Image (cartoon, coloured by chain):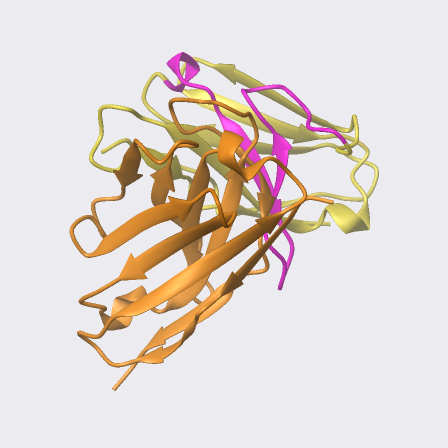
Amino acid sequence: QVKLVESGGGVVQPGGSLRVSCAATGFTFRSYGMHWVRQAPGKGLEWMAFVRYDGDKKYYSASVKGRFTISRDNSKNTVILQMSSLRIEDTAVFYCAKELRSGTYAPGPTDTWGQGTLVTVSS
Amino acid sequence: SYVLTQSPSVSVAPGETATVTCGGDNIAAKSVHWYQQKPGQAPVLVISYDRDRPSGIPERFSGSNSGNTATLSISRVEAGDEADYFCQVWDSGSDNPYVFGPGTRVTV
């Protein structure tokens, strides 16, 4: 079945860097755009970044643009979020999510989410 | 950037209909998607493109979008429907293009 598994979360100091990954199984990964969405404790959903199915187009939220980089490796069915200059307010559960429709050029709804990985930014 | 508004909470009796609204400037011009999130779980897509139900979502869930308000309706509400519900749109011209609403807690 379709499954996404995030990894790489942990505790990092303010100003530090961290890389979180998402391993995908059960579908043709190279055909689907992928997202990263985060949720701070007790808060709502905040979208971070999107990478198109072919990796050629990326979008970012204003709050992470220039600090976070999304990438994908279609040979390994993996999407990665490289985070730098981390702030205390970046503390959250980070989810990767798969687009509902294949081959889309603009981001749309997501029909599969991972279980999330917790990133804690603290001194 | 585009802003979505939702009421913080809705309370409904079992068997009744819950109505969750999502407000935005001329939101009818955009496609609205709805997610359900239960405590400790990842979100689940319940309505896409204003009114489409993904496979496995009960017919009790329906959506509409008109003017400045999109609506998620849950008919014959069950205890298992108690959750947070988030609307979401894509606003291509914005510096924050992929927007979630703040969420509505539906209490049964």
* Identity of the residue drawn at 78% across and 39% down: B77
A92, B37: nearer the viewer: A92
Residue B74 pos. (x, y %)? 71, 32
The answer to whether residue A60 is left or right of residue A1 is left
| Residue A40 in sight from this viewpoint | no
The C terminus of chain A - image quarter: bottom left
Q: State the image quarter where residue B58 is shown.
A: top right
Q: Is residue B62 above or below residue A42?
A: above
x and y percent of residue B9 in the render? Answer: 55, 48
Q: Quadrant of residue B41?
A: bottom right
Question: On screen, B93 above or below A69?
Answer: above
Left or right side of A29 for B83:
right
Q: Is residue B49 magenta?
A: yes
Q: Quadrant of the N terminus of chain A?
A: top right
Residue closest to the eye, B23 or A117: A117
The chain letter of the orange chain reads A
As rendered, which of A49 and A55 lies closer to the eye? A55
The structure residue drawn at horizontal position 37% and vertical position 40%, both measured from the top left corner, is A50
Seen in the image, is B94 located left or right of residue B26?
A: left
Q: Which residues are magenta?
A: B27-55
Task: Identify the residue shown where x is 71% and y is 43%.
Answer: B12
Image coordinates of residue A122 in percent, x first then y, are: 29, 82
Query: Is B81 part of what is drawn in magenta?
Result: no
Instruction: Find chain B in the image and tell me its colour.
Output: yellow
Q: In the rendering, at what x and y percent does residue B61 appear?
A: 71, 29
Question: Looking at the image, which residue sits at the far front?
Answer: A75
Residue B38: quarter of image = bottom right
